[in-house]
Image (cartoon, rainbow, N blue to C red):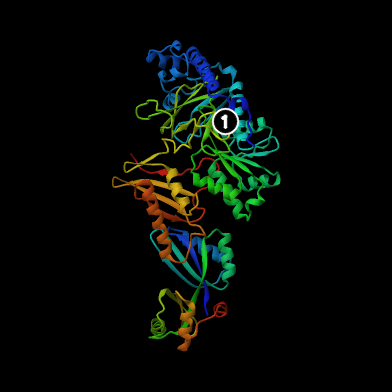
Amino acid sequence: MSIKQISVFLENKPGMLCAMTDVLARHKVDMRAFTLAETSDFGIARIIVDDSQRTSAVLKEEGYVHSVSDVLCVVIPDEPGGLNRVLQVLAAAQVNVEYMYVFLGREKSAYMIFKVADNTAASAALSAQGIQTVEQEGIDKL
Amino acid sequence: MERYYQPEIECASREQIKAWQDERLVKQVRHVWDNVPYYRKKMEEKGLTPDDIRSSDDLHKLPFITKADLREAYPYGLVAKPLKECVRIQSTSGTTGKRVVAFYTQHDIDLWEDCCARAIMAAGGTDEDVCQVSYGYGLFTGGPGLNGGSHKVGCLTIPTSSGNTERQIMFIRDLNATILCCTPSYAAYIGETMKEMGLTPDQIPLKAGIFGAESWSEEMRQDIQNTLGIKAYDIYGLTELSGPGVSFECSAQTGMHINEDHFIAEIIDPETGEVLPEGSQGELVFTSITKEAFPLLRYRTRDICTLTREPCPCGRTHVKMTKPQGRTDDMLIIRGVNVFPSQIETVLLNHGYPANYQIIVDRVRSTDTLDVQVEMTPEMFTDNMGEIARRQKELVDGLRSMLGLAAKVSLVAPKSIVRSEGKAVRVIDRRKI
């Protein structure tokens, strides 16, 4: 129904982001998606990785404050109207989207990541309209 | 059961203490008049001779001595004994400018160590205890003072000095240290490191800590007590007067008993220099009445506190001083408002933030700015930016109501604020005035 997302606290100053990606590179963490939200003094890097448990352990070891949360992932065809169709369903079900981001898969498809207040309700609404959410295994295999 | 190192002194009657002070002050004034031209000149300027000081009631007639005098007289100008009779120097940490060098005879060291021994026993120490001294050794008085006191009590003493925190923890655990002596900021850091190593308070043999050399809040005490599973006692002192042990906390943990057989304490109005009645808040002034090599008469500490002679449940009769709110040198004046770092610390700890913080003061287009940098912790972090912003704002509001001043709160990366093994550097003042 949902997949794991890791959110990492970063100070908003030169070199902080690079220091974190360096840690991930050294530990051969394979990232599926990456997005950055920022304020003037700090940011949150949100990442989807191949192995969230191991990545979380690595980040803890290296002293990064972070959290792991469940987000929805939906595959949509990479064509006009693809995203709109998903959002129509969520809007009709009164599901509020806190934030979302996208990464492109192979074979002309896009993976949309949604942070919503209620994963279960959103997932049910989507599946009722024939839109399947991606499971964790689906991400790990990519 | 309350333990005392020198019960006949620590629990003496007020009359007896007054008698000691009267006799010793008269003798001390004569000693400096005879041996320190600097003092003689200062007394002559006020038209005083030793005959004008007949008891401690005449103390107020004497001129003050300040840190500026100590600097002017550096290095030998206030030494009252021939150097061949002096056996040691110690020096201030230089946190507030040029170092001050203090001299000791063997007798001075002996009395200083007695004071530290009183502090250790007041914290429950006996010859059964293992006392780890993690204060710096060397010019700094912390290590040598508590080391000497620990010997006098008969504790097995581990002179680790500061630094190498993992090794500190190894000794505490392997040798079953029951008492830890260091600065409160270092105690907090040792606690933080133990927590990271997965140690819980019941796996740590410590039962008491004697922490001093910097001002710390009541909230920080609670924090250290919880993390280390100990009772944390405050100890106060100045290199100028001897070192740690000028005053110390007892089991009541409600102020520090001043060793009045060695030091006479006064509270004055820092503006006018007038002596204030008991219970008033003001600047603490000390006269050392037993020091041979480096006696100070009416030394202005610039520490702000109050004194009380109300009976203490511990049985000690010596006057108690409150935890200094901060040294007047620590006090920041920001946009005309007096701010003590300890007030900021109180707000942070009350809001669930750690005691790792730094205060950055700057001046932007002739307006002072106050930036409080706090480390993000796993407990305070969430993926929800709005929630983080809300907590940040709560902290800003808390600071405003405590200080009466708008401050910026910056959340910084964990471990990015340098941990102190001695005195913590809390304030960075970038104003060019």
Residue occupying the point 52% across, 14% down? B27
Q: Residue B87 at x, y = what percent?
A: 60, 22
Quadrant in the rendering for residue B331: top left
Q: Residue B194 at x, y = what percent?
A: 61, 51
> Measured along the vertical axis of the image, is residue B327 above or below residue B204?
above
How many marks on residues? Answer: 1
> Measured along the vertical axis of the image, is residue A88 above or below residue B422?
below
Dot 1 corresponds to which residue? B316
Determine crowd level at label 1: few under 14, some 14-19, many 20+ residues with C-alpha closer than 10 A: many
Q: Is residue B106 at all visible to an observer of this figure?
A: yes
- Viewer-side residue, B32 vs B283: B283
Q: Residue B241 at x, y = what percent?
A: 51, 27
**Which chain's residue wears label 1?**
B
Q: Is residue A108 at all visible to an observer of this figure?
A: no
Q: Name the image quarter holding the C terminus of chain B.
A: top left
Horizontal side of B403 relative to B185 (left or right) equals: left
Q: Name the image quarter holding the N terminus of chain B.
A: top right
Q: Amino acid at mark 1?
A: Arg
Horizontal side of B21 relative to A39 (left or right) equals: right
Residue occupying the point 57% across, 79% down? A137
Q: Residue B183 at x, y = what percent?
A: 55, 40
**Disc 1 secondary structure class:** loop
- Viewer-side residue, B401 vs B35: B401
